[in-house]
Structure formats: structure tokens, C-alpha cells
Amino acid sequence: MKKILIAFYFLFFTLPAFAYIPPSYFIYNKIAGEKETPFPTIKLSVTKPAAGGTEETLGTITISSIVIEENRWPVLSILFPSTQAQLKNSIKAFGLNIPTEKDLLIVPENQISQAKDLPKKLYKNDENIKLKRYGKSYAWVHRNAENKKEIWIEKDSFLPLRVQGDCPKELEDVLAKIDLSEPCSFEFRNQYSLKRGRYQQAKIILIQKDVPLLYFNFDKITTNKSPANIESTERVQSTLQPALNAALDKILN
């Protein structure tokens, strides 16, 4: 009954403000959807910029599961979320706070049904979310002001645009151009094609100061039938040099 009252009140009194600046939990629930979907096996070819606008092939890396671990970048988990909980756990492990619906309630849930005069606004704003310009569009930016980590989500499509933070120190020994004093970002290209199954057209780029450091192209995506299939396989297989493979294995999630 309480949930019905909350939903009713929310619908008629607070929806316009909520629709304009949605809380972070709503954004990730929207991205993941309601169904549980096993994480696929993803084969990526890895290249780096070379002279004359070409790319030097470094090898391939195949990732078969997600690991919830501190400071891993939720680059693949935000593209292929298994569940709402898994996605939000990956985001929180990266270093971003996700307040729950109860956290944002102005009136405690157990007092709503008894309250005579409810406030016009039932929810506090999620201060972690801002609306910012992104090219010709807009993005919801989920940010931690303390560690300066950010995730950019396209406003209307809820497709990921960018995962940003301090450059991973694991890459210092394998990328000569990386500067650990400057932020890095994994940026997504052609996510629409990826969602429609045309994964060969999609790409992920590791960027620092608008300069590409690494390109990740989708070679193959294999749908796993159940989580058990994932657990029975090695998480990472690679033809990359050991140092780069170890760094990416530690970072990508």
C-alpha cells in the first residue's frame, strides 16, 4: 500500500522535476532494463595510432565475465549489463555513489501513509547528477566531485558516451604517451549499431586530452546462455603483449 501511495504521489506531484534531472539509480535501472541477461563473451582487437593516420595492431583480448572490484572501469559492464544490481555494483566499485530511492525520500517511507500534509516535492535531488552539453546533444553526467570520476549518458537514449577518471596507473609502463597527472576517458562510438547487433561498426577509444591512446574494435560477441557458462571459462584470453594484457585485465570491467 505504501509503495502505491508513493507511486501515486510521485506521478502527480513530482514527475516534471524528476524527469528533468533523474537520480542515478533510475538511470542505471533504465540502462539495464528489467530482465537478467548473462554477460556475453566479447573479443576485441586492440590497436594504437600510427603514422599517417593509420593504426598499429597490438593483438586481441577476449573477456568472458565481469569482476566487481575496486577501481575497475565499467566500460563493458555498462554496454552489456547483466542485471540492475550488477551494473550498479560495477559503477560503485569504480568510485561513484548511487543513492537509493529511500535515500532520496524527504519524508520517511513509513510516515507517508500517515502524513496529513505531504510536501509538494517528495524527493531530494540526486546531487551526483548534472545535465551537460555533449556535442550536439545533452548528457546526464554522474560525477564524484572528490575523485573526479564521471560517467556520461546520452540524455534521451540512455546510451553510454564516456567513462572518465584518473588515468589507470597500470598503463604507465605500456603506453609511452600517457600522463598520469591528466584524466583519461574511455569513449564509445556507434553504440546504436552495437545495440542493433552490428557490432563491427562500434568502437571504444581510450583518450587523453583529446588524443587517442588505444582503439578497441569489436571482433566477435558470443551470447552466453547462462551465468554458469561464464563461470566455467577463463575470464580473459589474449594475444597482446603480457604487460598490456595484464593492465587491461586489471582495468576493463
Image: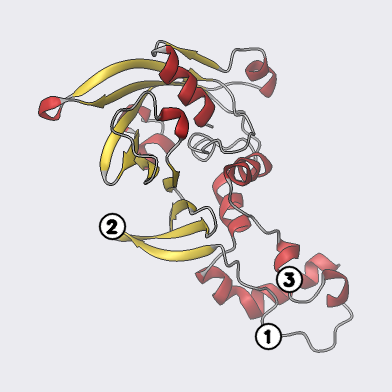
Q: Secondary structure at mark 2?
A: loop
- Splitting the image into 4 quarters, where does residue 124 fall? bottom right
What percent of the width, then of the height, locates residue 134?
33, 58
Mark 1 and mark 2 lie on one chain; the one further toward the N terminus is 1
Residue situated in front as seen by the camera: 8 or 46: 46
Mark 1 residue crowding within 10 angstroms, few (<14) / some (14–19) / many (20+): few
Residue located beneath label 1 in the image: 120
- Say which amino acid is labelled 2: Gly
Q: Answer left or right for 245 relative to 250.
A: left
Q: Is residue 8 above or below residue 129?
A: below
52 sits to left or right of 50: left
Answer yes or no: do the residues labelled 3 and 1 have beta carbons within 8 Å?
no
Rounded to the nearest angstrom, the CA distance separating label 1 from label 2 is 35 Å
Q: Residue furthest bottom?
A: 117
> Does residue 14 sit above or below 56 in this rendering?
below
Element on which disc 3 rests: loop
Q: CA distance from mark 2 to mark 3?
A: 34 Å
Residue 181, quarter of the rendered image: top left
Residue identifier under label 3: 105
Give the alpha-carbon distance from disc 3 to disc 1, as whole Å.
12 Å
Amino acid carrying mark 3 in the image? Leu
Task: Point out which mark residue 128 bears.
Answer: none
State the residue in front, 20 or 151.
151
Q: Is residue 61 visible?
A: no
Find residue 219 and report its horizontal and vertical position in percent.
Answer: 37, 20
Quadrant housing the C terminus: top right
Nearer the N terminus, badge 2 or badge 3? Answer: 3
Do residues under tags 1 and 2 come within 8 Å of each other at their CB atoms? no
Find residue 183 and report its horizontal and vertical position in percent: 39, 46
Which residue has dot 2 on it?
135
Q: Looking at numbered disc 1 in the image, what kind of residue is underneath it?
A: Lys
